[in-house]
Structure formats: C-alpha cells, structure tokens
Image (cartoon, rainbow, N blue to C red):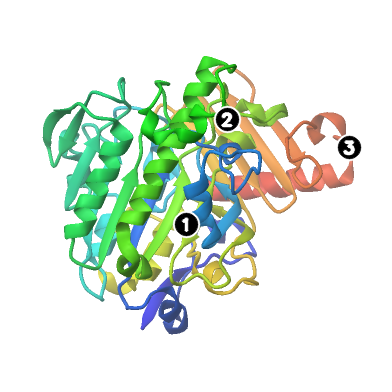
Amino acid sequence: MLSRVFEPQCSSWAALGLVAFALVSCAENLAEVASTDSPNVLVIVLDDVGVDRIGAYNADSKLTPNIDGLAARGVIFSRAWATPLCTPTRAAIQTGRYGFRTGIGTVGVSGLPTEEVTLAELLDAGTAGRYATAAIGKWHMGGNLSGGAKAANVAGYDHFAGTLGNLTDYFEFKKVVDGRTETVKSYATSDQTTDALNWIRQAPEPWFCYLAFNAVHRPLHNPPPRLTPLSARAGQNRDPGIAAFESMIEALDTEVGRLLDGLGAERTANTNIILLSDNGTHREQTVEAGKAAAGKGSVHESGILVPFMIAGPGVREPGRSQDALIGVTDIFATVADWAGVDLEQAGLQLAGPLDSVSLLPYLSEPDSAPLRESIFSECFRPNGPGPYSLVRRAVREDRYKLVHLEREGQAPKEHLYDMLSDPKEERDLLRFEPEAPETQAAHDRLSARLRELLEP
C-alpha cells in the first residue's frame, strides 16, 4: 500500500511550513500500526491540563493513574506544542494547518471556514474504505462560518453529541445532538464518556472518534465523590480552588479509564489512541515557577507544552519517551497515514499548505531521526486575516526558543531562551547576553525561520 508521509525537509523553515508531499512506501509501517489495513482511531482531548498535572510527566502528580497507564503502553512526547488557547488548537488538530492559515487565532464566534478540510472529511477519502466518524464533547469551533448548531456535522462528522462551547455548569447544560438541543442533568465528563462509548459500540469498523472533554476548564467544582477517591483522601487543609481543580482532574482521569476499559480487548487491539491537551494549565492552577507560571494564554512553555501520547498496536517498545519536536498539527498527517489516505489521489481540495508531519516513524522506530528542525505556536486576535491587535508567537529548535510579541500601538518585543540550560525561561538572552555570538546567531536564525513561515 502506498501512503502519504507529510515530511518537511529539515534544510529550511519554508519547507517545514509548506510540507513536501513525497510518495513513499509505508507497507511495513502500516502493517505494524494495526492488525488490519483500517485501524480505528480515537483522539482524546483534555482541556486546560498541562504536563505539570499528568503523572507520566510529573512524578509528583498522583491523580492520573489511568492516563499514566495509557502512557505506559505507548509513547509519550516530551516536547509537544499546542497553541496557547482552546479554539486555535482544535482548529489545528482538525485541519493540520496553523492559525495564520485558517484565520483561527483566538476564541470567538467565527468558526472554521467551510473550505477547510477536516479530519472527518480526510477519512471520507480513504482508499481502504470509508470511516464512520463522530465528534463527542466540546466543539468550540462553531459560528456563522461553520454551520451553527450543526457545525461538526457541516465539518464532515456523521455524528456529533456535545457542547458548542464552554460550560457554565457541569451538572446541568445544553447538549447538541446532530443539530438538536437538549438539556442534560448529569455530570458532563461522565455524559461525554458515555456518549463516546455508546457510539463506538455500535459504529461499524473502521471508525474515528474525536472526544474532546470540557474538563477541566472552568468553572471549578467538586465532581461526584464516586469519581474522586484519591482526592477525598488528600485531606481538607487545602485551598478550595486547588482542591476542586485537582478533583476535576481525578474525575477526568477516572472517566478516561472507564472509556479505555469500555473499548474491550478486541477493539483495543485494533485502535490507535492519541491523548493530548489543548493548552497548558490555567496560571492559577499551574504548579510551575518562573516564566512557566504564565500558563494558559502564554507562548511560554506552560502555555503551549502539552501532554501528548500515542498508544496502539503500532507502537514498538511501549513505555518510552520521545523528545522529538512535534505539534498538534501533526495529528492530521498521522491519521491520514493510518487510514492510507493519499492526498494527491484522494481528490481533496485543501484550502492551502499543510503544516503536518506523520508521527508513525516515531512509533515504529524508537531511534527514528528527527522529522522537524523546528516547531511553531501562536495566538492572535481578532480571528481572520488581520490586522491583529495582539500577536503572540514562538518558534523553537532543539536548543533555542524565540518569543515574538506584538500589541497594537506598541513596538514588538522579543525574548530568546536557551531551553537546554534554562527550561523555565527565566533568563532572556537578548537582555543578559545580547552581544554574545551565540545569542545573535540563534536570534537571526529563528527570526529568519519565522519570516519564511509567515511569508504569503
């Protein structure tokens, strides 16, 4: 079988942004990835959960045993970037394209333009047979451009059951089911897990399920006690907000465990699972210090460095960590590879260049060479083609990271960090060592990559 690998050449940032499409034979990779030519795919998106709150990344965190168990039978990526905010990350997952291409840079009523090809539409083009597709949980990409209440269905999903945006109450909320709205009076995290399991159990194979939890996005609350046995034993001498937040994480992990158990052995054997978060932990709940404490909304690490793990039949030597530079856009190419979709032959009319690299080599070859030289993240406002009143961008190579900030009416600001010696971004080299040759060379190199990527 021939499969498309979206592999940028490492010789230039322009090549990374535009993605070179080269046909390669992936028969061996695909044979390892699943027991059939058409593996099921489950993508689980957590909300506002940074690496500081996942035990597989931070041994001090004890509230995620089920997620940690998934990591133990897969590969965790230690340098995975999302965007700083919810909607731009979700758009990047669905399209494999950066926000400046789709026009989605912040949270807002404007959703995905209908000309964008989503994961569901991608899977309709698979040569191995059409995938059944469902989006469950938080969509947050609706709006006038995307079909309103039927946004996910307009974006190609056979079935949608969830919320169009954030919740104001986890115990009573409006749920949209394929364009129809109903009031639900049960715990949202549990309801979304049940919706996903019910759909998976009746879906014909192969299937693709995109499950995006609202948790642990605000409002903070105390979940049903049955979901939080660990938090209940943690004692009462804690800040109520932190206690509620940590209870929400445990409840989320409990429901992830119910979901994974509910797949059953046979489905699990033929299902590739990606679990990630949409951005870092909210700054008031992050456990980090230094610049990392900027949290959600920032292009510092605790705003964009997210838990990202893949488990499934294609993972060789599970239980390992991979330090390759990856981004949430890479889900698009990875899913395409799993499904055997060849873009040139599929007839899809992409809205523009992809920014996506298939992660399959990292799964099948533990010593695989890096597929990217650099990664990129951004948020901006308002949504659309610009001009923007606020821009936050970051570009990173193995050692150095450049942060570029723009605000309307102010001169742009930049910061440069040595991520190997200063992972908390506490020492700005442009301030403390501006004349050092290494500082100037790194700044010039990353600035050039940023310009090349953003050129029309």
- Per the model, the C-alpha gap separating discs 2 and 1 is 21 Å
Q: Is residue 341 visible?
A: no
Extreme residue in the left direction:
180
User: Which residue shows up at 37% across the image and 43% down it?
Assistant: 255
Q: Which mark is residue 435?
A: 3
Q: Is label 1 in a helix, a strand or a loop?
A: helix
- Per the model, the C-alpha gap separating discs 3 and 1 is 36 Å
**Looking at the image, do the residues carrying marks 2 and 1 touch, with CB atoms under 8 Å apart?**
no
Nearer the N terminus, badge 2 or badge 1?
A: 2
Residue 453 image point, x, y percent: 55, 49
Amino acid type of the residue tagged 3 in the rendering: Glu
Pointer 1 residue: 330
Nearer the N terminus, badge 3 or badge 1?
A: 1
**Looking at the image, do the residues carrying marks 3 and 1 touch, with CB atoms under 8 Å apart?**
no
Looking at the image, which is closer to me, 29 or 227?
Answer: 227
Using a 10 Å C-alpha cutoff, classify the residue at mark 2 as few (fewer than 14 neighbours), some (14 to 19) or many (20 or more): many
Q: Which mark is residue 298?
A: 2
User: Which residue shows up at 57% across the image and 24% down it?
Assistant: 283
Q: Nearer the viewer, mark 3 or mark 1?
A: 1
**Looking at the image, do the residues carrying marks 2 and 3 touch, with CB atoms under 8 Å apart?**
no
Using a 10 Å C-alpha cutoff, classify the residue at mark 3 as few (fewer than 14 neighbours), some (14 to 19) or many (20 or more): few
- Per the model, the C-alpha gap separating discs 2 and 3 is 27 Å
Residue 101 image point, x, y percent: 41, 45
User: Which residue shows up at 60% across the image and 28% down it?
Assistant: 286
Instruction: Work out whether 1 lies above or below 181.
Output: below
Nearer the N terminus, badge 2 or badge 3?
A: 2
Answer left or right for 287 relative to 220. Answer: right
Quarter of image, res 368? bottom right
